[in-house]
Image (cartoon, rainbow, N blue to C red):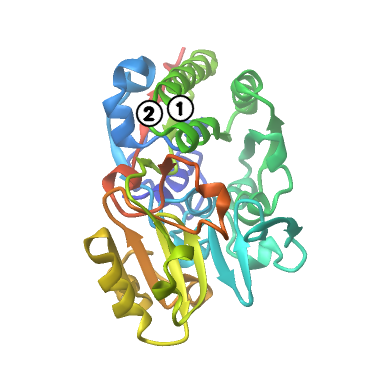
Amino acid sequence: MTIAAVVPSLLSGLEVPGVDNTLGLPPARRVVLLLVDGLGHELLRTHAAHAPFLSSLTDRSIDAGFPSSTATSLASVGTGLLSGEHGIVGYTFAVGEEVLNSLTWSRAGDHRHDLRKALVPEVVQPHPTVFERAAAAGVAVSTVAPLAHRGSGLTRAVLRGSWFRGVAGFGDLALGAVAAVGQDRSFCYAYHPDLDTIGHFYGPGSPEWVMQLEFVDALASRIASRLPAGSLFVVTADHGMITAGERIDFDAEPLLWQGVRVIAGEPRVRYLHTETAEVLPVWREFLGDRADVLTREDAVAAGWFGPVSPLAADRIGDVVVAMKGTAVLLRGQAEPSWNGLRGFHGARTREEMAIPLLVHSVPSV
């Protein structure tokens, strides 16, 4: 089971037609889904003592889907589809002649170059969202997320159809989520980003990360304690995280450049758009057991992306590189913002792919 099944399973209890409860979640007429960015299942298990509320809930894991990247997983939450169908195939990916940073909806490497007009979000991701379907069925649908996400390209592409409430921190996120389910047949998707940010800077499991986990646990507990009777509270994540070991710099390895027209993705998963078939054997030999290096056709046949539509196929690239272990493939000159980070995600390891599915039912009066 994958993250794409979470919202449809929850909406089945709200009498939304055409969705299935494949995860077997309890039905409820008021539902809050809290997504904690970067809260991997393995990380939560390892640090359970620092998250007593979350750890008291059912210990169940599902898959984030591939790549295990934020924009991809949020698209799966919003559409009920995997990356091969919704087409948000990673942090950066080629759309025609542009390489899109899907989090900022800007040109990769240039956050000032807004692409919302050139690459219209509703065209880049054209499938109806599950939020739109729920709203059309009479459900009061809300998104509670950071203020900066209002009207962003990614919000328009994958979360459209919900009423957006921008928040600044823990307090208004918690109270906003509770207020959003004050009426019958209501659904709230709430998003908290900071655990992922701390993990990138200091590493997952670092003292800073552990303290942030304690705050997240308190946030979840506060939301649960304030929900109306009969509500359902579900906590999940978009991916886990690893601490980087070996750092390989593409920009310092001229052998890897040969025949590569465009390189996209992020340090744990790369898409290579190539000019020659020789790229594949060169990369396989260079990376060895540090990565799985597949053609697009082989990665698709292996089911990495789920069903793949023509929309997504060209965005994947001719060669897919999924790092193994803890190695990361950086671009020291072209992507300097990654150089000093410790935590990474995107690849296919259990540490990155496994996410928790935690369920709390508020007793009825």
- Residue 161 lies, with reference to residue 231, above or below; the image says below
Q: Whole-percent x and y of residue 223?
A: 52, 19
How many callouts does the rendering have?
2
In this view, the residue in front, 332 or 68, is 332
**Farthest residue, direction left:** 289
Quarter of the figure with residue 320? bottom left
Asked if one can make out residue 15 in the rendered structure from this viewpoint, the answer is yes
Q: Secondary structure at mark 2?
A: strand
Q: Is residue 20 visible?
A: no
Q: Quadrant of the rendered structure where residue 42 is?
A: top left
Q: Earlier in the sequence, mark 2 or mark 1?
A: 1
The one of 360 and 14 positioned closer to us in this rendering? 360
What residue do we see at 49% from left, 24% from top?
A: 231
Kindly identify the residue that appears in the image at 51 percent across and 19 percent down: 219
Q: Secondary structure at mark 1?
A: strand
- Mark 1: amino acid: Leu
Q: Is residue 216 above or below residue 191?
A: above
68 left or right, relative to 131: left
Report the residue at 41% width, 34% height from top.
203
Q: Which residue is mark 1?
A: 232
**Which residue carries the number 2 mark?**
359
